[in-house]
Amino acid sequence: MGAWRFRGASLLIAAVLCASVPTAYSATRAPAQRGGAPSATGPIPDMRIAAVVNDDVISVFDMISRLRMTLLSSNIPDTPEARKKTESQILRSLVDEKLQLQEAKKQNIVATDDEINNALSQIEKQNNMQTGQLTTFLKARGIDRSTLISQVTASIVWAKLVRRKAAETTEISDEEVDDSLKRLKEHANEPQSRIAEIFLAVDNPSQDAEIRALAEKLTQQMRQGARFSAVAQQFSQSATAAVGGDMGWMRPDQLPPDLAKAASSLKPGELSPPVRTTGGYYLLLVLDRRNGATGGGGQQSDIVYDVVQVVVPLPPNPNEQAKRAAAAEVMSMRSAAKNCADFLKVGKAKAPQFSSEGQVNASNVTPQMRQLLDKLSPNEASQPILQRNGIGVVMLCSKQTQAAAKSGEPTREEIFESLLRQKLDTVARRYLRDLRRVAYVDVRI
């Protein structure tokens, strides 16, 4: 149930191992600015009106702050092309949030200070930040803290609204749970795929070309290193957005035919092209495959990497000289370390806030990072990697296969949660569609 409580609160903003772009550092020239939409890297814009939603205003400043945060957290390069492709969806998301906040106010639904602070604390913990460091991180990158607060608040109140609406119209009976368990047992030995999704709704035919262009742009960015789960959290309009788009283990018969066909052609780690359905466009990522619910022997296995990562930080919008200096420094640390213990010691001495060690499952890293780690031998370090907050190096300490003790057969509670999430997804889409239908929305840019 926590998935709906914190949609948007699980944004991974700081650069961590899972969000690294596994591309060796090379000099790149910053793209030239061009006219049109306000620049996400230029000076803070004035408070011109971007859109009016009933009695509330969305400013250009609001839009640019959200655009910056979205590109940063999704690991999408901040370029004029990326801004042009995503700005319409960003504005649409801001309009939806206004409608959600307005409806929450009308229904006397609030997000408490504790709920908001817990959500922000969760973000900091996920990114190995100290308390309060998130605010500093955002400010250094020209992102107003209120942008994140607004998104988190809307997520919390919208989850409450949807659950209230679902409680009035939706009931999951014991018979439904029994039927689902029966079907799972009947198909227990059939192959399954663990799939993640991004859903982009097309509310009317006039939006089709725009949404398809966005889907294609997101596909391109993810194939270049943007992390699927972060993109899903920012862009997907499915309930699974809160958990990075992860749908869990699925059989082909559990998916709509178009999606089942697209998923069947993918290998683990591969991303589908945009798939058009009656409701909009889907992007699918196959995370893993197994032969039946138990995966053989009643256990699931995963590769676990024990790694050390050291990052030399860069200022916002660094020039090429700063990048080269950071790359040279991290290479010097890399050369001075013969093993993981040495590398961590050197990193803690020179870059204490951005040096860490730990274990990470293969299913939780990007396909590119997994390929990079698989090529390394124990105590071997990667070439410098250009990340969002600096130039980093990853050293592999060990790699092992770990078996999960959990049985492949889900519990009744897990089945209930799955059914509930599906119904909440349907309720949420209808609820928001109804709010849009009666709203006054005037887009000014």
Image (tube, rainbow, N blue to C red):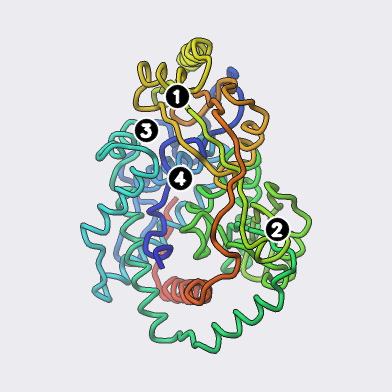
Q: Earlier in the sequence, mark 2 or mark 3?
A: 3
The answer to which image quadrant residue 151 occupies is: bottom left
Figure quadrant of the N terminus: bottom left
Q: Amino acid at mark 1?
A: Val
Of callouts 4 and 2, which one flags the residue occurring earlier in the amino acid sequence? 4
- Percent across and percent down for residue 196 are 60, 57
Q: Are marks 3 and 4 in contact (CB under 8 Å)?
A: no
Give me the C-alpha separation between circle 4 and circle 2.
34 Å
Q: Do labels 3 and 1 touch, CB within 8 Å?
A: no
Residue denoted by label 4: 70
Q: Using the rendered image of the protein, determine whether residue 28 is visible from the camera's viewpoint.
A: no
Foreground: disc 4 or disc 1: 1
Query: So how many labels did they put on this image?
Result: 4
Of badges 3 and 1, the one in the foreground is: 1
Residue 222, can we see it?
Answer: yes
Q: Which of the pair 313/443 is nearer the observer?
A: 313
Amino acid carrying mark 3 in the image: Arg
Disc 4 packing (10 Å; few <14; some 14–19; many ≥20): many
Residue at image x 51%, y 38%?
19
Mark 2 residue type: Arg
Label 3 to label 4: alpha-carbon separation? 12 Å
Horizontal placement of 323 versus 408: left or right?
left
Q: Residue at x 47, y 74 (%)?
A: 413
Q: Nearer the viewer, residue 188 or 130?
A: 188
Question: Of label 1 and label 2, which has the lower sequence position?
Answer: 2
User: From mark 1 to mark 2, how far is it between C-alphas?
Assistant: 36 Å
SS assignment at label 2: strand
Sequence order check: which comes first, mark 3 or mark 4? 4
Label 3: which secondary element:
loop
Q: Which residue is mark 3?
A: 141
**Mark 1 closeness class: few <14, some 14–19, many ≥20 residues within 10 Å:** many
